Image: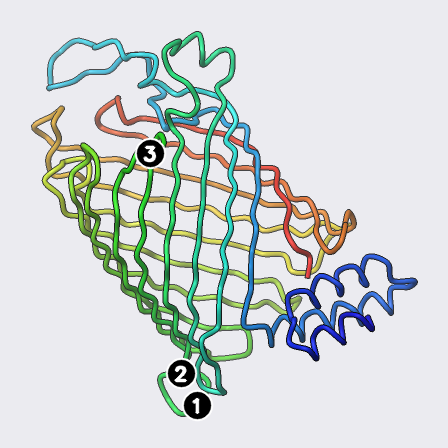
Amino acid sequence: MVMAQALSSNGAKTRAQLWLRRAAQNAPSEEFKQIAIRDFRYVQKSNPWATELSFSASPSSNINNGSARSSTRLFDLPFEFQLSGAARALSGIQYNAGIATRYRLSENERSQNDLLVRLDHRTYTMSPEAKVLAPNAKGADFAFSTASLSYIRRGFSTAGLEFPNQFEISGGRTWYAQKPFMQYARFSFTQNYVFATGNFVFGGVSREVQKSMSAREDADSWNLSGGVRVTTNNQDRVTFSVNAKKSNSIDSNLDFQQITLSARYAVVRPIAGVSIDFGMSVSKKDHETSRFSRFGRQDNTISFDATRVFNRIEYFGFSPSITLTASQTASTIGLYESSSVGFRFGIQSSF
């Protein structure tokens, strides 16, 4: 605690946070641990730098978003085409690693201005069954990486505090199978209205332009979103949202309209030392044209996820988490029908 205070007073806020995690880990009592956590949050708030590391491993029944079917009808012909192994759902393990570093450019009572750099990478290993199904494929063939830089401004739209907003502009580049895939620019604006403590409605708009660096075509899209978050009497959080997306491209796979309805419930107070957060969503996507049918293509997707954080298992303020994910897509073209079930094992900060 003394070392953390000295570092913080000297401006070394990040190192002070590391020492406060050590203090919480070695606290002689729960009371002293809570003091260390309180001081950690104070230093964290005053630190212009904030860095988040993320790691996870996720066994999945469909690492390549392949078709759940072994054959499908195409071109409106009355017979089935056999799908190649790489086009079918392949099981395996997904590995994710990421780092996000934020630097606060300026801050006052009315606004915060941040720069955010984010790097993410995911890769896969295939199961023995997947290797038999697609012997010429390997997990790295589906690897995906992203690098982005964002400017984020948070402030208020009125003199009061009931209308907080956020503006963000981002640019980034992606790689698929270690090869340049596409680059993008995006801006978004979200407006909130707080009608009671912990309760607010929100609405937002975003625009994204994608420029291809591969055989993939260019695309641009608009997103509209809205919803409400309500805090219950026991401090649990319930969120309902709707998102509408319009994507434009000369590639029929990237030219579509989509609407998604989502609901989430977060249990704030741990139950038997376990925090729970779960949600589900349903979406409908419509492609007016398709290379495989003159009737276009319609997809209906339902997905579910639930995360459990084991707060009683803690080391230097980090606790393990398990997330269950499941999704299923029904499509008018069998090639795009898919289903996936997976578990994600990760670690996250408990304070």
Q: In this view, does 145 lie above or below 170?
A: above
Direction left: furthest residue: 294
Q: Which residue is drawn at 75% across and 63% down?
A: 19
Circle 1 sits on which residue?
A: 160
Q: Residue flagged by tag 3: what amino acid is it?
A: Tyr
For the C terminus, give its image quadrant. bottom right
Q: Residue beneath label 2, please?
A: 156
Q: Is mark 1 on a helix, strand or loop?
A: loop
The furthest residue to the front: 10
Using a 10 Å C-alpha cutoff, classify the residue at mark 1 as few (fewer than 14 neighbours), some (14 to 19) or many (20 or more). Answer: few
Residue 140, how many percent across, how many down? 42, 25
Counting from the top left corner in percent of width and height, residue 190 is at 35, 69
Is residue 236 or residue 49 the one in the foreground? 49
Q: In this view, does 289 lie above or below 257?
A: above
Mark 1–mark 2 Cα distance, whole angstroms, equals 7 Å
Determine the CA span between mark 2 and mark 3: 39 Å
Which of marks 1 and 3 precedes in the sequence? 1
What mark, if any, has residue 176 been given in the picture?
3
Answer with the quarter of the image where residue 25 lies.
bottom right
Q: Which residue is rendered at x = 46% and y = 46% of the image? A: 280
Residue at the location (40% across, 27% down)? 339
- Real-space Cα separation, disc 3 to disc 1, in angstroms: 46 Å
Vertical placement of 186 versus 111: above or below?
above
Location of residue 165 in the rendering, given as x and y in whole percent from the top left corner: 38, 75
Q: Which of 29 and 305 is in front in this view?
A: 29
